[in-house]
Amino acid sequence: MTGFAFRISGEASVPPFEQLRAQVVEGVREGRLTAGERLPTVRALADELGLAANTVAKAYRELEQDGVIETRGRSGTFIAAHGDAAHRSVQEAAAEYAALARRLRVPADDALAIVDAALRIGT
């Protein structure tokens, strides 16, 4: 599940569903939300943010229509891979590698160094 903290301002002129949608898009663009990362369920996020479930569901629907997220049935909602086929493949492989590194408790700096070394082989 994502460690990304969503925040909704009740005083903003932008509706809450749009604030949430924009935060997901910004998180993806800045790399704080990565391909394959699981998002909270609609109900869980609604409870966390003090919103109606329909508000979160509306944001998720729009994000899915835009290809930013994907719903995988009972498995949940995830950040979608973006770009051309090559980039999508690399994003998916990176998400799998990150999950493996977390499972094996390899520190992030070490995991990044391993990738950096692998990329330099043959150059």
Image (cartoon, rainbow, N blue to C red):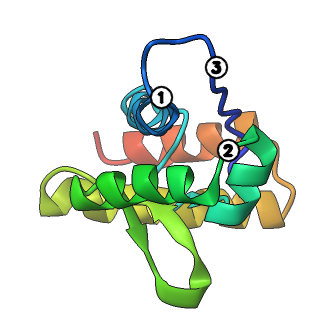
Say which amino acid is labelled 2. Leu
> Mark 1 or mark 3, which has the lower sequence index?
3
Q: CA distance from mark 1 to mark 3?
A: 10 Å
Element at label 3: loop
- Label 1 environment density (alpha carbons within 10 Å; few <14, some 14–19, many ≥20): some
Q: Is residue 69 left or right of residue 99?
A: left
In the image as oriented, which residue stretches furthest toward the bottom?
Answer: 74
Judging by the rendered image, the residue that carries numbered circle 1 is 19
Q: Is residue 80 above or below residue 50?
A: below
Q: Is residue 99 left or right of residue 94?
A: right
- Label 2 environment density (alpha carbons within 10 Å; few <14, some 14–19, many ≥20): some
- Residue 74's tag is none
- Asked whether residue 81 appears in the rendered view, the answer is no
Judging by the rendered image, the residue that carries numbered circle 3 is 10
Residue 6 point in image, percent of width and height: 65, 33
> Mark 2 or mark 3, which has the lower sequence index?
3
To which quarter of the image does residue 70 belong?
Answer: bottom left
Q: CA distance from mark 1 to mark 2?
A: 12 Å
- Residue 51's tag is 2
Say which amino acid is labelled 1. Gln
Q: Is residue 24 left or right of residue 90?
A: right
Q: Nearest the camera: 21 or 98?
A: 21
